[in-house]
Image (cartoon, rainbow, N blue to C red):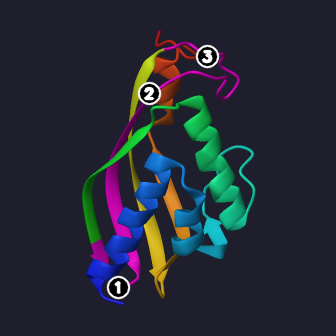
Amino acid sequence: MSLEQNKAVLTRFVDFINTGKTVIADEVVALDFLERDPFPGQQPGREGLKALILMLRTTFPDLVWIVDEMVAEGEMVASRFTWRGTHRCTFLGVPATGKQITVTGMVFDRVVEGQLVESQILMDTLSLLMQLGAIALL
């Protein structure tokens, strides 16, 4: 597949994040998908990834994921992202705060034959927890 086709797979996956339409994930995520650094409690494979995204969409129902920058080389697609949402349910042990949060990070994805097969996300979780009031700077 071309670099542009690989980037299009990730753009389509972001459509799943932003809409919660699981049929999109079924199209673009491999059944045996591998998350290199899984979110706490994330189950393996496509189903685990879908469940995680749906949990995030429940917790932050107005969640919007924006790709700020994307580059590709071979099977790898790297993107810098920003996501925003309003905290409406308990998340990582923090009860709903109603706060609007903004999180940044990078993700490195591997695409093979039109499907996302592997991912490693580096997200500013400290900032997220600070915005929720779970952690205070001294």
Tell me how many marks there are: 3
Give the amino acid at mark 1.
Gly
Dot 1 alpha-carbon crowd within 10 angstroms: few under 14, some 14 to 19, many 20 or more: few
Check disc 1 and report its element: helix, strand or loop: loop
Q: Is residue 97 above or below residue 63?
A: above
Residue positioned 42% across, 56% down in the render = 15
According to the picture, the residue beneath numbered tag 2 turns out to be 127
Mark 1 or mark 3: whose residue is earlier in sequence: 1
Q: Is residue 97 magenta?
A: yes
Give the amino acid at mark 2.
Ser
Residue positioned 71% across, 61% down in the render = 47
Label 2, label 3: how far apart the Cα atoms are: 17 Å
User: Where is residue 2, by image quadrant?
Assistant: bottom left
Mark 2 or mark 3: whose residue is earlier in sequence: 3
Judged by depth in the image, the label closer to the viewer, 2 or 3, is 3
User: Where is residue 49, by image quadrant?
Assistant: bottom right
Mark 1 or mark 2: whose residue is earlier in sequence: 1
